[in-house]
């Protein structure tokens, strides 16, 4: 009988090592994302406080995006689940920021596209909220 390649007789060990490496990489990347977000937020605070003008709505909405990213990472570390709704919140805030900042230079069609996108994302949040309350997922087993 021909050998079809190496076989691992102790697949549980391989699974554990693979899960450990994945978890370490995942946590490392979340830590890097957190540090980069805090760094960017501090830079924005520096820009706001060192500037001569008062902070604009553009600055405040950008800080909300940073806050939502940090909240999403924090929730993941507490629950070990990625809150997809926060990604949608970030997208809504980003689109709102673009709409508010560039409103004067946009065509009516662009305004409608951005507004429609925000409406669709809002409906997605409602669908996610309804789905998670109506069909709760089981906690992860380890």
Image: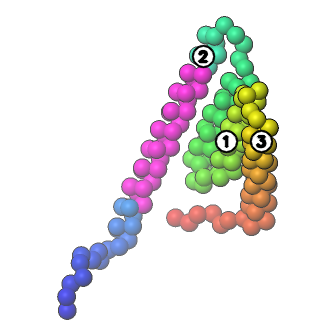
Q: Which residue is mark 3?
A: 109
User: Where on the picture, by quarter, is residue 137?
Assistant: bottom right
Residue 71 at what x, y percent from top left? 64, 40
Q: Which residues are magenta?
A: 19-44
Residue 136 at what x, y percent from top left? 72, 65
Mark sitting earlier along the chain (2/1): 2
Mark sitting earlier along the chain (1/3): 1
Question: Residue, x 52% and y 27% (percent of image)?
Answer: 39
Q: Which residue is mark 2?
A: 47
Q: Could you say whether the residue bearing mark 3 is in a helix, strand or loop?
A: helix
* Residue 115 visible in the displayed image: no
Residue 73 at what x, y percent from top left? 58, 43
Q: Determine the CA span between mark 2 and mark 1.
A: 22 Å
Q: Determine the CA span between mark 3 and mark 2.
A: 33 Å
Q: Could you say whether the residue bearing mark 1 is in a helix, strand or loop?
A: helix
Foreground mark, 3 or 2, reads: 3
Q: Which mark is residue 90?
A: 1
Question: Residue, x 57% and y 47% (percent of image)?
Answer: 77
Tell which residue pokes out farthest to the top in this image: 52
Question: Residue, x 74% and y 58% (percent of image)?
Answer: 128
Question: Residue, x 76% and y 63% (percent of image)?
Answer: 131
Tell which residue pokes out farthest to the left in this image: 2
User: Where on the picture, by quarter, is residue 38?
Assistant: top right
Instruction: Please check the rendered image and state whether residue 30 is part of the magenta-colored stretch, yes or no.
Output: yes
User: Is there a contact, CB below 8 Å, between mark 2 and mark 1?
Assistant: no
Instruction: Please check the rendered image and state whether residue 26 is part of the magenta-colored stretch, yes or no.
Output: yes
User: Quick check: 93 above or below 122?
Assistant: above
Quick one: 89 or 25, which is closer to the camera? 89
Q: Could you say whether the residue bearing mark 2 is in a helix, strand or loop?
A: helix
* Residue 29 visible in the displayed image: yes
């Amino acid at each position: 009988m021909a050998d079809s390649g190496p076989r691992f007789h102790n697949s549980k060990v391989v699974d554990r090592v693979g899960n450990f490496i994945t978890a370490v990489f995942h946590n490392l990347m979340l830590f890097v994302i957190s540090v980069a977000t805090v760094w960017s937020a501090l830079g924005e605070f520096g820009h706001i406080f060192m500037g001569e003008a008062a902070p604009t709505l553009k600055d405040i909405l950008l800080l909300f995006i940073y806050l939502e990213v940090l909240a999403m990472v924090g929730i993941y570390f507490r629950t070990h689940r990625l809150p997809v709704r926060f990604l949608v919140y970030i997208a809504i805030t980003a689109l709102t920021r673009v709409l508010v900042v560039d409103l004067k230079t946009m065509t009516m069609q662009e305004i409608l596209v951005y507004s429609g996108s925000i409406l669709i994302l809002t409906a997605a949040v409602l669908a996610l909220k309804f789905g998670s309350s109506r069909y709760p997922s089981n906690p992860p087993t380890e």
